[in-house]
């Protein structure tokens, strides 16, 4: 694979707010709009390994890293609001993602995290998790889809999300509707589809093959010489 791309998707209770529209213009909840945009995004990731982590009260691996994009799209479609609990454990989702990347052998590793609220349930704060991600050369782009003017758990803490992205060398985006969300993932597709150097290995020719071949040729010539000599001696004996 050229790169490993990990999607983090918030399934907390506030993702059921119907303030987005689908491609037909119908009003839908946030998660439905996110699924539709991500489905299109995944169709453009041919050649990459993609994983999916969902989070609510805790974070769970929905899809481990795979190049089977069709399976990833199917398992994304099967997610539902609150299936991981109503709260938002964003920091723990980043931490789980770092663990997944420990087995990654590619140099270019990126998370794209989508959330719509404050972190309300993590054991590891997002800021601390972001620093660990940076130490592991993982870039995190963050997409916020909540309301910055809301109060309580549903308020989108844009400052905290921007800090997570900037700490790791990523970018923060805010989507107020589906069109903006689609534009963001199109931009992320452009950012994260860059040439990756591929190493080419030439089969090594073992030098011991050459003396071995020379020895075999010499042996054949030696035996051929003996055979000719013996035939000559046999002919001389018969004439004598």
Image (spheres, grey):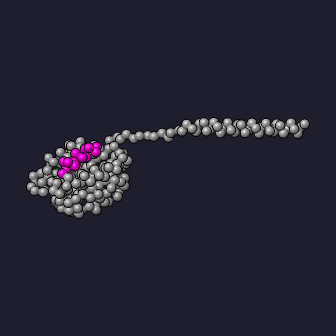
Q: Is residue 218 above or below residue 35?
A: above
Q: Horizontal placement of 122 versus 201: left or right?
A: left
Location of residue 201 in the rendering, given as x and y in whole percent from the top left corner: 45, 40
Location of residue 49 in the rendering, given as x and y in whole percent from the top left corner: 35, 50
Choose between 38 and 14: the one closer to the eye.
14
Q: Write the residue at 17% across / 57% down.
A: 121
Location of residue 180 in the rendering, given as x and y in whole percent from the top left corner: 20, 49
Q: Write the residue at 50% across / 39% down.
A: 204
Q: Quadrant of residue 150?
A: bottom left
| Prevalent SS, magenta region | helix
Q: Horizontal placement of 89 versus 63: left or right?
A: left
Name the residue furthest right: 240
Q: Write the residue at 23% across / 61% down.
A: 84
Q: Quadrant of residue 154?
A: bottom left
Q: Horizontal placement of 20 versus 77: left or right?
A: left
Q: Is residue 16 above or below residue 237?
A: below
Choose between 217 and 25: the one closer to the eye.
217
The magenta stretch is: 125-137
């Amino acid at each position: 694979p050229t790169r490993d791309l990990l999607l983090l998707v918030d399934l907390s209770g506030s993702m059921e707010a119907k303030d987005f529209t689908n491609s037909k213009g119908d009003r839908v909840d946030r998660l439905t709009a996110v699924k539709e945009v991500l489905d299109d995004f995944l169709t453009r990731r041919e050649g990459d390994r993609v994983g999916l982590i969902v989070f609510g009260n805790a974070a769970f691996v929905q899809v481990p890293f795979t190049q089977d994009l069709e399976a990833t799209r199917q398992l994304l479609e099967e997610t539902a609001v609150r299936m991981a609990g109503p709260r938002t454990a964003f920091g723990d989702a980043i931490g789980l993602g770092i663990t997944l990347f420990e087995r990654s052998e590619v140099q270019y590793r990126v998370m794209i995290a989508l959330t719509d609220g404050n972190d309300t349930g993590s054991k590891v704060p997002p800021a601390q998790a972001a620093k660990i991600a940076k130490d592991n050369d993982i870039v995190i782009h963050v997409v916020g889809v909540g309301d910055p003017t809301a109060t309580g758990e549903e308020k989108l803490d844009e400052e905290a999300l921007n800090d997570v992205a900037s700490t790791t060398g990523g970018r923060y985006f805010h989507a107020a509707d589906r069109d903006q969300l689609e534009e963001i993932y199109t931009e992320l597709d452009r950012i994260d589809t860059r040439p990756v150097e591929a190493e080419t290995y030439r089969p090594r020719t073992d030098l011991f093959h050459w003396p071995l071949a020379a020895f075999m040729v010499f042996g054949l010539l030696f035996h051929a010489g003996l055979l000719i000599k013996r035939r000559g001696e046999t002919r001389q004996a018969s004439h004598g």
